[in-house]
Amino acid sequence: MRVCHGEIARWMEPLGAQVRIDAAGNFRGVYPALQPNAPRLMIGSHLDTVPNAGAYDGILGVVLAIGLLQELRGRRLPFAIEVVGFSEEEGVRFGTPFIGSRALVGRLDQQLLGVQDARGISVRNAIEDFGLKIDQLSQAELARDTLGYLEFHIEQGPVLEKLNLPLSAVEATVGQSRLEFTFLGRANHAGTTPMHLRCDAIAGAAEWITTVEREALKVPGLVATVGKIEAKPGATNVIAGEARLALDVRHSTDETRLRAVENLIRQAREVAARRGLSVRESTLLSQHAVAMDPFLIAEIEKAIVKTGCQSHRMASGAGHDAMILAEKVPSAMIFLRTPGGISHDPAESVAREDVEKAIECGLHLLDQLASSPEFYKRKNLA
Ligand code: GLV
Ligand code: MN
Ligand code: MN
């Protein structure tokens, strides 16, 4: 991350930008406005990624923001542009996503600072180990004069490719829950313990995983995933005494998502009880669905049309920092078509022409906003 920060700082500084790393490990670079003390527009995405990832989820949005500034070719606007490269959006290390962006809205709280990674290192310690100061977290918060947040991101799904469209405005991002389940049984010898006398934590977890899939299939639009499982003690000839699983549940309607989570917890308890196991769960995230800002959506659609493309709006099934920023500032996103709809995988890609279209669209959008009285009325609730 440090190398990455250094690299993008090297791209931004020659444009006249002031760069810093805030106390939550987010990259921040401010491209000045025509006049001092002008308000600002924030543009960015996240710099972290998932294990065995592709090259574009997140980082494309940061690179694109810098590309936009380069394409301004020294031109300044009536507002400054703050480029942000968020840390810890995916939630890989601590199980909880959006840690960097939560700092901008003042929600990197004591509880979140205490969350630990697999090695027992807390968010607080990780921040300090990186050389940052917890007592300066308030300096990571959004500047009061922030008029909006804009995020370019790959779609990460097949919709735009199917429609043969390079770009789309995002109208909303779906809500998501993340939970950790631990099934506890009794570790024992795999050769000497008869099948009917076992308390096998992995077998119980496996039964519940197929229940998750079956239950999710019953609810239109619901997605539920067990993407991670760890068992202890973890040997071929030992019945597992413990199985720990990560559950991810998403739906555009919060009520449906919460009902599904309750149902899956109940099912886990039933499976465990029937098998003589115990199960406990903890909720790491319950993020409600978030609508993007209607004014910015409309402006994005106009800008897309100006690039010669058909305008389109769609919901995002993936989570984004824009969901968090939207709590405090008008926020919006632009999706780029994702070849094959593949993401969170090394095969993830993006077409060069689509990136060029996105930059062209971004330049139109900046000009539209620069001359829109409505834009300057935008309120930062920070
Ligand atoms: C982020 O990629 C998420 O939607 O989990
Ligand atoms: Mn991702
Ligand atoms: Mn992402």
Image: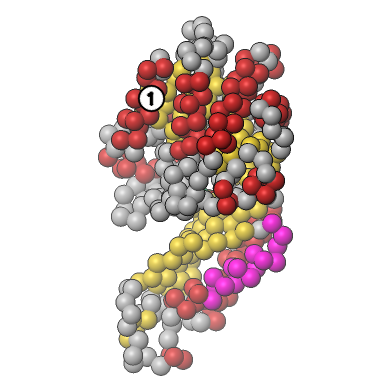
Q: Can residue 359 be seen in this view?
A: yes
Magenta stretch, main secondary structure class? helix
Task: List x then y, in percent, for residue 199.
Answer: 43, 82
Q: In which quarter of the image is residue 17?
A: top left
Q: Observer-nearest residue: 22 or 84?
A: 84
The quarter of the picture where the C terminus appears is top right
Which quadrant of the figure has residue 236? Answer: bottom left
* Residue at point 54%, 52% (across, down): 342
Q: What element carries label 1?
A: helix
At a point 34% along the width and 56% down the height, the residue shown is 118
Q: Which amino acid does label 1 sit on?
A: Trp
Residue 200's place in the image compared with 164, above or below, is below
Q: Mark 1 points at which residue?
A: 11
* Whole-percent x, y for residue 228 in the image: 45, 62
The magenta region covers 207-221
Residue at (63%, 22%) from the top-left corner? 364
Q: In this view, does 306 lie to the left or right of 6?
A: right
